[in-house]
Image (tube, rainbow, N blue to C red):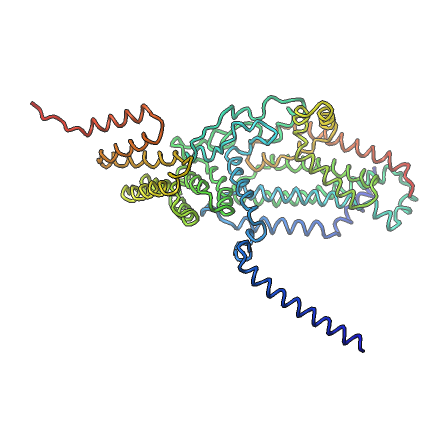
Amino acid sequence: MKKSLAIAKVVILEMYRRKDFYVLLALTVLITGLMGSVTFFDDPKIGRYLKEICLGLIWISALFIAIATMARQLPAERESRTIFPLMAKPVSRGQVLFGKFLGCWFASCAGLLLFYVFFAFVAASREHQLPVGNYLQAWSLHCMMLAVVIALTLLGSLLLSSVAANATMTVIITVGILLVGRHLHKVGLRAGEISGTLLTGIYYLLPHLELFDVRDLIIHNWPPIAWHIWGIAVLYAMVYAALLLFASWLVFRKKAF
Amino acid sequence: MKSTRAGLLLLTLLLITCAGTAARVDRWFMCWPGNRAKSFNPLGVFIGEGQKMFATHFYRKADVYLHRGGYPTIFDNTEPYKTSHVAEDAGATDHEHKGDEHGFLSEPLDIIDRFNRNFFPSKHTELGEDFPGAPAANPDGKDGNGEMREILPWLRAAAALDPEVPETYTVTAYWLRRKMGKVKEAELFLREGLRNVPGNPTILFELGRIHFENHKDPTRARNLWRQGVAEWQRQEAAKPEPDRFIFAQLHANLAKLEEQEGNLAEAIAHWEQIESASPASASIQAKIAELRKKQAPVPPPK
């Protein structure tokens, strides 16, 4: 674990030096600020539209940061040939993979926390309330979703030849699940026998990332989710991330560079 | 040296040809009716008619906000949501939704579906209704906790993107006036609508209501509603399927106004107009009979 944490620390430092996060945060602040400056019918308290815009930007930024950072990790090591001295050290391939995953995940979660602090500030400035429990749930569920996405990207970086192909595939899969993942079974029931069975099979197999998207609950000030439900969702994400990491390790342990 | 000179000459010739062609095409482009560059609206320049699509989306979004995000997707039962509830509550449409709006998600299909419903608004509720964590609405129907205001940005955006839809103005004005008490803003927005859709009977009707109900100015209200009837005759009467709903609304409100002012003959005339335009209604006939009874001179005491 110590070795994996040391590798994770290097990944975090690398991300800290990169400009992606700062640019995305600045853009989110700028666009939200700009949209917040608009007044509708002389009512300065209207806030839900702003929350929706801000959360939308946060989701796009978080996905971009997580996927772009993870997709670059192994190919960059391979291109700069630093993978060889890394492998020569007394660390196993599994520890390298886990370290890379942890680094990207910690860094994404830390970045996400800043985004959510900004969001909480924006929401509180309009609505004069700070539902900490709701925001904590939203942030933690978002982090858990990123864990699955990062593990998926890691697997993709071992299976696909280029960073662009991997990033594109991961974005398509993630956005696809977020948009229609919840409805696949319904569509499957209406479709023909073969395609219906196929869709239902995919529905049960794919990681339901849409579970972690609680934006609508936050925007419309719904009460927080029951904590035991939250716990099951967190466990669900952990299992999927672990499965994807295990698959990555199976590919990586035999991979020749 | 020779090749350099030839190259320069060729370049000059190309530049002159380009400038000449551009000047010619520019003249034509400026006169072309499809030229979007004439518009000062940057969105219009970029997406053109696509604005209307976004306007419809934003109008629907206001309805989503009215339901606190609990709204069916295209994969769910959309039957009870065919008509926008924002418009329905505002009385801007005579359609009524069918089906059970509470059951828009139907029964969960599987364990994942059941579990999933904890993570998005899966129950039917509307702004102003009792809701955990939100103060209740005032008994007079006005927005007690100020939540109704949240639908306004989407209605404003819809009007900005497609300014020629009168329903957007009347619905927005209803929510501003009736639920938020913002009479001045409602009137200004309706006047903006009247500038974009001149002489629209629906907007004139709503404007008349403001003068009648809020400003207590029956004279102006009467003028606006009469203007609305005249515009309806001009714009709608000749159509194969005219909008009879707004025609009836205009006459019904004029009838009420005349009755209140003591002009019973006028009031009867308006009710008769409604009766002639719509299928025979017992309530209208009863109303006319009641007014005729009132109109009849009281016999002197013996």
Hey, which quadrant is residue A236 in on the image? top right
Q: Quadrant where the N terminus of chain B lies?
A: bottom right
- Residue at horizontal 46 percent and vertical 43 percent from the top: B165
Q: Does B287 appear above or below A160?
A: above
- Residue at horizontal 60 percent and vertical 62 percent from the top: B25
**Tally of numbered discs:** 0
Q: Quadrant where the C terminus of chain B lies?
A: top left
Does the image show residue A2?
no
Q: Does B273 appear above or below A35?
A: above
Q: Position of residue A84 (x, y in %)?
A: 91, 46
Residue extending farthest to the bottom is B1
Q: Position of residue A256 (x, y in %)?
A: 92, 41
Q: Does A126 appear above or below B13?
A: above
Left or right of A224 in this view: B241:
left
Q: Does A16 appear above or below B111?
A: below
Left or right of A52 in this view: B17:
right
Q: Position of residue A240 (x, y in %)?
A: 76, 31
